[in-house]
Each structure stands twice: as C-alpha cells, then as structure tokens.
Amino acid sequence: MAKYRIAWMPGDGIGVDVMHAARLVLETLELDAEYVPADIGWEFWCNEGNPLPERTIEILKSCTCGLFGAITSKPNDEAEKELRQDLRGKGLSYRSPIVGLRQLFDLYTNLRPCKAYKGNPLNYKDNIDLVVFRENTEGLYSGVEYHPLPDEVRHTLKAFNERMSRFDSVPGEEIALSLRVITKAGARRIVRQAFSYAQKFGYPTVTLVEKPNVLRETSGLMTREARAVSNDYPEIELWETNIDAQMMWLLKNPNDYGVIVTSNMFGDIVSDLAAQLVGGLGFAASGNIGDNFAVFEPTHGSAPKYAGQNKVNPTAMLLATKLMLDWLGEDEKATCLENAIKQVLAEGTVRTYDMSGQSTSMDMAEAVRDRL
C-alpha cells in the first residue's frame, strides 16, 4: 500500500499538459504515492451541471492531499449557454470548483511563494524572494452575493446603515451586491500563519496589506487582529500598508518585502503582481492549505487556446509539486526538485515560448527529470 494517496485533478485546458509534466517528475523522484484520478472542471459543468461532482469530494476525503492543474471559469450567463440542453433553465449556477474546495475543506491558507531564479530572462529584478499569505475562505470571495437584490435584504441593510438609502430609486434587478465577510478567527489564523513562517525562515518583517482608511470595518478588523497577533512575535516587525500604495512599492522596491499577508481578493491581486516580478504566471505556484488537508496548483488559468499543444511553461506546476512535497514532509525530494528546476533555468538551453524559446512543456519536464 502506498504511503500517500494523492487526488489527481488535471482539470481544464493546459492543466492536462502541465500535469503530465508533474507526473514525469514525481515518477523520477519515486514518491511512494498512489495517484487517484478525480473529475473536476468545465466538462463536468457542461455535461452534469456540477464542475465539482460529489464523487470527487468523496475521493478527496480519502486522500492525503490533492494536485490540481487548471480551471476554466465563466460568468453565469455564459456558463448557462454551455450547459447540456436538458440542463438549461433549471436554476443551476456555476461556481468555481477550486473556490468550493477551499471552503469545503477549510483550506484557509493560500501560500504563494514568488522567487526569482537566476537565468530566467523574465525576472524583473534579481534576488526577489517573497511569500504571500492570502486568506482563502472569506472576504469578497465568500460567495455571499445577490442579483437581483431581494427586497428583504435591501430593507435589512437600510435599517442598519442609512447610506443604503441612496439606492432607494434603483430597482432591485439593477443592483448586484457582494458581501465582504471578515471574521476575527479567519483574520487571526492567516496572520499567525504568516508570522510563524517568518519566524521559521528568518524573515524580519511581516507586511499586512489592507485598506482600513476606506474599508473601516472589514480591513479595520483585519488590522486590529494583526496587531494583536504580532505581540506574540516581538522579534518580527509588523508593517501596515494600503493595497493601492503597496502595488506601487512592490513594483518599485520588491526586495524590501519578505512575507506579505492579506485578505482574499487583495491577496489575489498582490500575488499576481509578485508573480510577474519573477517571470509571470508560468512561475507562480500556490498551496491551498488547511489544518489536515491541502491542494496544490499553479496559479495560471486553463488557457484553452494552448490546450493540448504541449507548449506552455510547466515550471509553476513543478513548483506546486515542490510545495506539495514540502507539505508531505518529503524535504529531500522537495529540495532536489527545486535544485533541478534552478539548474535548468540557469543553463538556459531549454526555454518555453514565454521565455522566448522553442521548447515544449515536456522538453522542460524532461530537462528537470534529467537533472534529478
């Protein structure tokens, strides 16, 4: 019996291509694992009305962790048009399965390392080595949304906040509403993860990125909890910045930052900018991590126009595999994999199209395999 059961979820588009690359590397590393295929993605939305079937959830419950490729996601009106004919008009609503997984398994930490590797022609600046901790289950991605706005919701909001009165003349069908939900417990635990990581790896600062001067209640709560948690780590300085200013400073002085922590949507934004600083989404991996389960993925999308062409850069997927090995406690294998990736990038003879090269996805994977 294998030591690990890993849910194998290629998903959509180029997710299939980059997962082939990951499998080659994992087999070379001889990880003692069983890879359990699990259905997820646009195909299952179109044919079943559910991009995250119940059978997949049951598989995940029986696994150690999951490895995921990429997902296609579209607005509800477009998603409805692509449903199988007999499923249309039945009130089905598309929701991103990766967001569903994060909430279902309480994968509250989204860990996004952004590191510049020598030899990568796309690095904005050398020596960038920062990590974004994004809260993964709350905020504007909580899924508490309304359109049209129900009268009872409107009246309740108006009873507690007179500013809602300025929308009295707007019909409910012309209003869409999303709620930004931040809890003390949610804020506290993501900030603690960031400080614990900084302590473990010797980072002198943790930067909280929010907007409390405007989002007074939600960002205000996040800020207060961050300050409280920071008291338990007196050797680490807490920096506080606003999301808009942070984008400018991160672009200007990326080497000033090591560990960044923020809420869900702001984390989505800041981590994509950080990824571009070190080469783009082809180098951006993430871990969705809870207390007892985790799912690892590249952060790029499904890029349907490249699907099946064996063209895209698999490095983000390989780095996500490295994060999975870290989480499993397979430290030696994780280090070997990262060192092999470093060697391939430093040599510069194998480069995919995004690095102005002609190599395929599997060329890149095979080069990493050879150095393992």
Image (tube, rainbow, N blue to C red):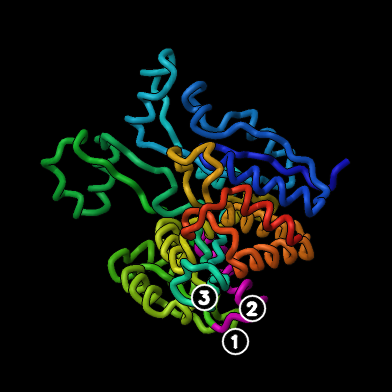
Crowd class of label 2 (few under 14; some 14 to 19; many from 20; radius 10 Å): some
Q: Amino acid at mark 1?
A: Glu
What residue is pinned by disc 1? 235
Cα separation, mark 1 vs mark 2, equals: 8 Å
Side of 291 relative to 188 (left or right)? right
Q: Does 69 appear above or below 218?
A: above
Q: Residue at x 49, y 72 (%)?
A: 226
User: Can residue 109 be seen in this snapshot?
Assistant: no
Question: Looking at this view, is 287 or 317 the one in front?
Answer: 317
Question: Residue 332 in the image: x percent, y percent?
Answer: 79, 65
**Helix or strand or loop: what does disc 3 sit on?**
loop
Question: Left or right: 328 with respect to 204?
Answer: right
**The magenta segment:** 185-204
Predominant SS along the magenta part: helix
Q: Quadrant of the C terminus?
A: bottom right
Residue 52 at x, y percent in the picture: 55, 33
Mark 2 and mark 3 residues within 8 Å of each other at the beta carbon: no
Q: Of discs 2 and 3, which sits in the foreground?
A: 3
Q: Earlier in the sequence, mark 3 or mark 1?
A: 3
User: Which amino acid lies under the numbered mark 2 shown in the image of this protein?
Assistant: Gln
- Residue lying at the far left in this picture: please name it: 169
Residue identifier under label 2: 199
Circle 2: element type: helix
**Label drawn at residue 128:** 3
Left or right: residue 277 versus residue 44 is left
